[in-house]
Image (tube, grey):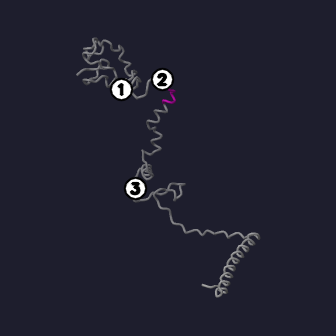
Amino acid sequence: MPYCPNCGAPVKAGERYCFSCGTKIVPVGESAGQNTNFGNPEYCEGCPENNTNRDDERLKTPGFGSNEYDRDGYERERMANTDKSELDERNRRVSYDSEEMSRREGMARDYESQERYRRGEEMAPDQPLPPPAGVPQEQIPGQIPPQQPPVMVRVPAKPKRSFLSSVAKILEILVYLGFIGAALAAIYLLYQFADSIPGI
């Protein structure tokens, strides 16, 4: 089994990069200056002489095109041009703060689990929790609000009609009565003259 020329870690056959330090491994037969002393990186030809700075070297990941990525997956150029506060904000988004963890009460998602965690006690699942201070009973999810008696709503009376609207209503009624009177008069005349009209 070959070893990494930089850190001395064992490397599986066919791997092109060291898993622990990211040094490129040249397979046997590809290079004339191939290191044959894998177990002793001090005598390695072409290896960095100062092996103490290997944590500062970044892992080059194959398959990402021409971009070089560090161990965390960020592009080197982007990290160099990025403000320190922006990098801190990115890291803060990824990991939980101790304050945020205590606020979330140990990742408890529902209200009952949070209450159990705060009190440090186990409660029966069918036992309802008391409402928190300042929250009305109707706003607690999962509980049926108490029934209240129906409230009688007073319907306002219709407003009184003005004089003009009253006159218009009377005229409308008279027009309907006129049509009815005209229809009755026509029927009466038809019966009066029905005997004099031949064929009826």
Q: Closer to us: mark 1 or mark 2?
A: 1
Asked if labels 2 and 1 touch by Cβ distance under 8 angstroms, the answer is no
Answer few, some or many: residues within 10 Å of disc 3's Cα (few below 14, many 20 plus, some between 14 and 19): some
Q: Secondary structure at mark 3?
A: loop
Q: Is residue 134 above or below residue 25?
A: below
Q: Earlier in the sequence, mark 1 or mark 3?
A: 1
Q: Nearer the viewer, residue 196 or 51?
A: 196
Residue at 66% over, 79% down: 183
Please tell me the numbered disc located at residue 123: 3
Q: Closer to us: mark 1 or mark 3?
A: 1
Asked if labels 3 and 1 touch by Cβ distance under 8 angstroms, the answer is no
On screen, residue 27 versus residue 192, left or right, reads left
Q: Earlier in the sequence, mark 1 or mark 2?
A: 1
Residues in magenta, as a range: 78-87
Residue at 69% over, 82% down: 185
The type of residue carrying mark 2 is Ala
Q: Is residue 53 above or below residue 168?
A: above
What residue does disc 1 label? 63
C-alpha separation, residue under disc 1 versus residue under disc 3:
53 Å
